[in-house]
Image: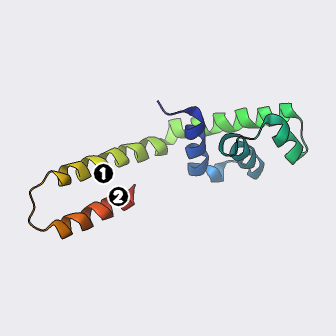
Amino acid sequence: MMEKNVEISILSQIYKNTLTQKQFEILDEYYNNDYSLSEIAENHNITRQAVRDNIKSGENKLYDLENKLGIMKKMKEQEKIVKDVISKLDNLPLQDKTELEKIKTELKNLI
């Protein structure tokens, strides 16, 4: 299972437009910039409890959207497929290695 900080960071990027600007900023400061609740409260001129409430409501919204839409799950599945294809390409006895490298580069750009 993915670490919660990484998971929330990815989900907040995927579903950024569904969060309020303030929710996104607070989640970003907390999960990506490692700010404390006190630092965030001071930055936004709100209480620590308001910061905590914003974090919890933002997390709940992100998890709810992911449960309904599954975009991050689909991205992980696609990444796994691309890595599997690259692995298989590495094991093919092809004459034209240049073409193989081009294909692998294009696949890597997808993830």
Q: Is residue 62 left or right of residue 98?
A: right
Residue 54: x and y, percent? 76, 37
Mark 1 neighbour class, 10 Å CA radius: few under 14, some 14 to 19, many 20 or more: some
Q: Quadrant of residue 3?
A: top right
**Residue 58, disc:** none
Q: Is residue 60 left or right of residue 1?
A: right
In front: mark 1 or mark 2?
A: 2
> Foreground: 79 or 38?
38
Real-space CA distance between mark 1 and mark 2, rounded to the nearest whole angstrom: 7 Å
Give the residue type at disc 1. Answer: Val
Residue at the spot of label 2? 108
Question: Which residue appears at 65% of the width and 33% of the height?
Answer: 60
**What colour scheme governs how the chains and residues are painted in the rendered image of this protein?**
rainbow
Q: Is residue 50 left or right of residue 71?
A: right
Q: Quadrant of residue 32?
A: top right
Where is the C terminus found, in terms of image quarters? bottom left
Give the secondary structure at mark 2. helix
Give the secondary structure at mark 1. helix
Residue 106: x and y, percent? 32, 64
Relative vertical location of residue 5 with respect to residue 24 in this rendering, above or below: above
Residue 5: x and y, percent? 60, 37
Mark 2 neighbour class, 10 Å CA radius: few under 14, some 14 to 19, many 20 or more: few
Question: Which residue appears at 19% of the width and 53% of the height?
Answer: 90
Q: Is there a contact, CB below 8 Å, between mark 1 and mark 2?
A: yes
Residue 45: x and y, percent? 91, 45
Give the residue type at disc 2. Answer: Lys
Relative vertical location of residue 21 with respect to residue 101 in this rendering, above or below: above
> Foreground: 38 or 59?
38
Q: Is residue 66 left or right of residue 109?
A: right
Question: Which residue appears at 19% of the width and 49% of the height?
Answer: 88
Say how many tags the image has.
2
Residue at the spot of label 1? 82
